Amino acid sequence: MATSPEPDDSLARLRRADLKTSVFLIALSVAMIWTALGYPLQDSYGGVENSWYVSPSLFPLCIGAALLLLSLVMLGNSIRFAIVHCRWNTYKDSAQFIPAQSALLALMVVIFIGSYTWLLLPATDFVVATCLFLVAFTGVFYATANVRPWSLAFSYLAGSIVLALPGALLPDPLPVPYLTDWLAILFTVILIRALLAQAEHSSRVWLVVLISVLTSVVIAATFRFGLLIPLPHEGLIVEAMHHLRGLLRQ
Amino acid sequence: MWKPCIIFAVYSANSADTVFDSLHVFLQFVAELAGQPKMVVLLFGSTFCGIIFGALPGLTATLGVALLTSLTYGMAVEAALIALLGMYVGAIYGGSYPSILINIPGTAASAASALDGYPLSRKGQGGEALGLTTTASFLGTAVGMIFLVILGPVIADLALRFASYEFFLLALFGIVISGTLTSTDLVYKGWIAGLIGLALSTVGRDRLQFFPRFTLGSPELDAGLDVVPILIGAYGIPQIMKVLGDNITLAQPAIVGRIIPGIRTIFSNLKAIVRSALIGVGIGAVPGVGEDIAGWVSYGVAKSASKNPQNFGNGEPEGLVSAETANNACIGGALIPLLTLGIPGSPPAAMLLGALMLHGVNPGPMISIERPDFLIQVTAILLLASLAMWICGILLARQVVKLLRIPAGIFLPVVAVLCVIGSYALGLRMFNIYMLVVVGVVAYMMSEMKYPISPLVIGLILGPMADENLRRAVMVSDGSMLPFVTRPVSLALIAVIVVTICIQFFRGRRMGKKHPG
């Protein structure tokens, strides 16, 4: 009888990830069931007579139960895999199911996008924040020859934290008008200089700058003045665009 | 003896009248839309953007429709439909460009096209290959459109007789089948993804009693989770992370000569085209499955049915035509359950559902009563969009090919900005942007662990429908579950769901004995 081939390490790591995920999902489903049991099952709510089948907990309980069942099946499968293939050693090693290089680059993407959405956008003018984000993000992934990507990424993160601080710590309005926006513009210039110093081809860096500025302005203008959608934070540049629009209309 | 003949004649005459009326309305819509220059520009513009979206690896039809949703928010329903359908049709077709020219599918729907498209391109027949896919895609969309107009009213009429029992089971069936067919690893990973989507849909106030569920005391969660930002996060952010994370460097596309429509080759493969179109429509009608599966299934069937299967994979036009016809026919198929039952047939259709709801259009059985001509209007727009796709494809393909030279490091950060502002624009909530990133990271981890995202999206969209109808159904029967098994359609749906689950478990056990793990 032909024997099945031994599964490779990547499948073993995937099953290990399944083991961890199933534990997490079991905890999540138990929490869901526990919380849903606290919702009105029999008692009246808001003056409305309640029964179990009208209760807002019915559907979450069904989902929680199904999720718990499937998570237990997945847990069992992962443990059975390790036992059948004697893969506890692979389960214990440090290699992950995502190749390290890909995981690190994906983490870098998260740092860029996360900083942009959580730190820059709420505190800085939309155009400036977007331009800064694009210069940093595109600079790392396009003008990459000789650029130290992680130092740039962490500098960008640190700068974003600093830019978010005035809005978080100082009272509104800020003592200096558009303080955060001016700091962001300064930071963008510093980043561009760092890219120019490190990149092999300065033409790429200037292309990055051009695309960043154009994209920010076009998107801001399209959404603010074309679709009449207020931007997350309107500061120095967007106000200037308002004034320019007023002048052009005159 | 004459009475049945008279009754049949009257019925046929009435049916013929209805057909003629519908045809008249259809032609009227087509003429109306084609006669408005703004709409024509919008149609061609959105279709061309869709082709670009499909052509650039990392961008998908779903993401294109999602981003366009925020731009069409202020438009009239008709204009928004034109833009969204143009984007949808263009993007599904556009994925064939990099498949053929650089062996990297632009969208998952065109993955099968690379198998024979790329060898054709290497033989210097890139222009012919692109011409073939353009015409095949046009024919596929047209067939899908025909089925939409024929089956749509029939299914809508049938669905009017459905009660809450059937709607709950339809939603459940959608999640089970979507999870089953889209899982590449263990089948219950798809079901888990669907359950996670259902769980997300319960966050906020429940629809029947307005009771807050899983809000953790947060006013933001109290308002519930907006569907569109989560869809953008689930499809857009993981793509950006994956393409940049894998550091994919695209090969330079070969120079493409004249784009030749390939009419002679199309005629010689007419049987394959009809078969592929039927496969595409059938698969499109299955909730949450999508164009990629349609392409692969059609390719597989074409290879099995071919007299020269050994030619497949070496530049066989039949292979290319089969894949492309099916994935575009899937569009019409996906719109059938979307418009008549409110259940999306594919991920881009799921996005389209979100967009339609934003514009105050509620797809479902009542659509034929609230908006009697809506189906015909959509069909007319689909026809014009496929025509626009064909014209853009034949005339502008070489310009689109130039765009393939743009490095991912340049266009993906711009896409990230569009994802962020697109999520914010619908609802003007910063919370949506925060959710976008969280959902994006979770979706990336899930896809790396081989969890399909489509069932999560289907669960999120169908969750409220399932919740409401379950409770309403049991309320009507005073707590009794008996009507679920005494009503014929409900019983049939339960049987299909149970059989599907059992087949997967037995198959899994048999595979487990052969290849444990």
Image: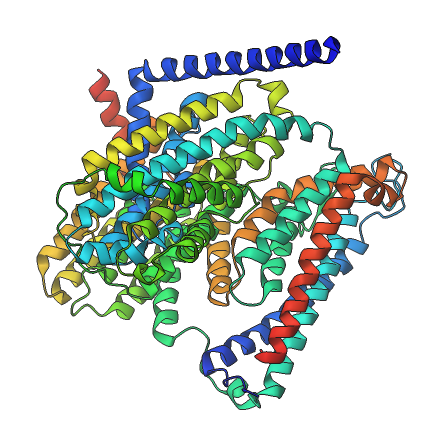
Tell me where residue A101 sits by quadrant: bottom left
In this orientation, which residue lies closer to the viewer: B200 or A191? B200
Classify residue A8 as left or right of residue B53.
right
Q: Where is residue A121 in the image (x, y as percent from the top left)?
A: 38, 47
In this orientation, which residue lies closer to the viewer: B210 or B43? B43
* Labels in figure, total: 0
Q: Position of residue B271 (x, y in %)?
A: 39, 42
In the rendered view, tell whether residue B427 sits above or below residue A181.
above
| Residue visible at 30% across and 40% down in the picture | B266
| Residue visible at 19% across and 39% down in the picture | B260
Q: Position of residue B491 (x, y in %)?
A: 78, 45
Q: Is residue B431 visible?
A: no
In what quadrant of the picture does the C terminus of chain A appear?
A: top left
In the rendered view, tell whether residue B402 sits above or below residue B75.
below
In the rendered view, tell whether residue B46 sits above or below residue B436.
above
Tell me where residue A146 sits by quadrant: bottom left
In the rendered view, tell whether residue A99 sits above or below residue B489.
below
In what quadrant of the picture does the N terminus of chain A appear?
A: bottom right
| Residue visible at 29% across and 70% down in the picture | A150
Q: Position of residue B309 (x, y in %)?
A: 36, 60
| Residue visible at 21% across and 43% down in the picture | B400
